Image: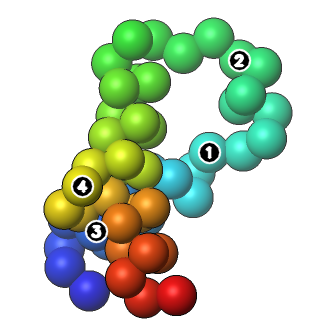
Amino acid sequence: MDERIQINWSIVTEWSEQDRYRRHLKEEAKNIYEAVANPKEGVLEWLKQHW
């Protein structure tokens, strides 16, 4: 697994359901979104390719 994808997985796995209700700093929200949605190295793209 590519190093950037591993980093993105670590960002995403730190998120919890309770975080949905917590206020996030703009930079933090951007990082979470990018970790999931990046078209080349995001978690969602990895899942599409490997599941």
Residue 16, position in %: x, y? 72, 44
| Residue 46 in sight from this viewpoint | yes
Q: Quadrant of residue 20?
A: top right
Q: How many angstroms separate mark 2 from mark 1 (CA)?
A: 11 Å
Which numbered disc, 4 or 1, marks the residue that appears first in the sequence? 1
Q: Nearer the viewer, residue 36 or 16?
A: 36
Q: Amino acid at mark 2?
A: Arg
The residue labelled by disc 1 is 15
Residue 8, position in %: x, y? 35, 58
Q: Amino acid at mark 4?
A: Pro
Q: Which mark is residue 22?
A: 2
Which numbered disc, 2 or 3, marks the residue that appears first in the sequence? 3
In the figure, 3 relative to 17: above or below?
below
Residue contact between numbered discs 1 and 3, judged by CB atoms under 8 Å: no
The residue at 33%/18% (across/down) is: 27
Q: Secondary structure at mark 4?
A: loop
The residue labelled by disc 3 is 5
The residue at 63%/11% (across/down) is: 23
Q: Amino acid at mark 3?
A: Ile
